[in-house]
Image (spheres, grey):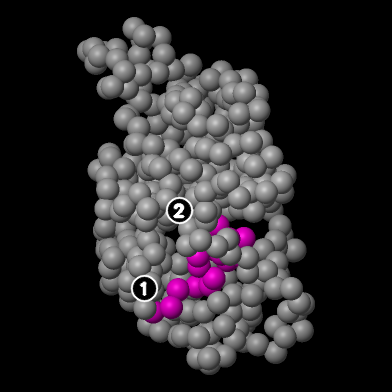
Amino acid sequence: MSTGNLIAPHGGTLVNRFAESNLTEEATSLPKITLSTKQACDLEMIAIGAFSPLTGFCKKVDFESICNDMRLANGTVWPIPITLAVDEDVKATLTEGGKAALYHEDGTFMAIIDCDEIYAHDKSLEIPTVFGTEDEAHPGAKQVMDEGEWLIGGDIHVATVTPEVDPGEQFTEYRLAPAATREDFANRGWKTVAAFQTRNPIHRAHEYLCKCSQEICDGLLIHPLVGETKEGDIPADVRMDCYNTIIDNYFVRDCTALSVMPGAMRYAGPREAVLHALIRKNYGVTHFIVGRDHAGVGDYYGTYDAQNIFDNFTAEEIGIVPLKFEHAAYSKKAQGMVSSKTFPKLEGDQIFLSGTKVRELLEKGERPPAEFSRPEVADVLIEWATSTVTA
């Protein structure tokens, strides 16, 4: 079925960086770069078109423009540089204008990169502009601090994005590339689609946001991130069980799609909210849910900074509608989810929810209450938490 009625990808064209020819023989004669987990996630996101219009890792002019202005050098909105960092030893094996072979940590050959540029990694520019802090306690900032001192910029030519030796949990059934979700939306007859980004199980506040969005769009894409996250986050396979459980019990399957997004978290707050919106635009989504402290960590960002950043761009530049939701809470008087727009605030009435609070309860072996999680989801979480403690 044609997907012509769907929203255009960011930049106008859905990128596909998979090579038509076999690259294995050529790779054997090239210098070798072993990718970090984040870099392998980024490679997949570029290859499948989720990072359209990017066709490779950032060159210097784009790196500097993104850090300073949240745009590619050609003016296209792009908030976070997608970089391939290497250390001095690897850099010494490379030739600017040459090529290099990219390998997964398990040894799987994945791609060839055109080493168009090899330039110094300006961390003093990237870290404060992208993360808004230089605190080593910030997981995203610390990750960049620990990366190599050189960046390789150039197009990638991809053989595979699936590790062969240790593939881990690939969620193959749900690992749909942007072209596949677009086809699914077209087959369902959806012209407007809201997407919900999550790295936590869906609790009652999340459910409220999702269902508000379903009332104004043809369909909902629950789109959890299953790439690299920080230590302490609930494992992706457990979260997937939670998503299917809540969809089966509390959503309408015909109006709800579930797919995974294989990107890595940066925890960059406002800038990452924009990145997540543009990614979903590439997947065919028209509306993107932006809730409280989207993609944030700790207290580095204001509660609604991730919503306010969208005001820096025109609707035409972003191309996807941000759905800006107030902080939702469970009201004992209303016996349901409310926000400051929908119910008066009464002293002692509202129970605020967060993924962090759920994790704290689980770490103590305590069952999340009904005001936090649906009972069926709580069953999945407490079973996982109990098995983790006793293992």
Q: Position of residue 12 (x, y in %)?
A: 51, 61
Relative horizontal placement of residue 14, taking residue 296 as reference (left or right): right
Q: Position of residue 90 (x, y in %)?
A: 53, 84
Q: Quadrant of the C terminus?
A: top right
The residue that mark 1 highlights is 73
The kind of residue tagged 1 is Ala
Q: Is residue 371 above or below residue 207?
A: above
Q: Which residues are magenta?
A: 40-60
The kind of residue tagged 2 is Leu
Which residue is drawn at the image coordinates 39% and 49% (left, top)?
A: 273
> Element at badge 1?
loop
Q: Is residue 390 magenta?
A: no
The residue that mark 2 highlights is 278
Q: Position of residue 186 (x, y in %)?
A: 65, 42
Question: What is the total number of numbered labels drawn onto the structure image?
Answer: 2
Count neighbours of disc 1 (C-alpha within 10 A) and say few if under 14, some if 14 to 19, many if 20 or more: some
Distance from disc 1 to disc 2, alpha carbons, whole Å, reads 17 Å
Which residue is drawn at the image coordinates 64% and 53% (left, top)?
A: 179
Q: Is residue 280 above or below residue 187?
A: below
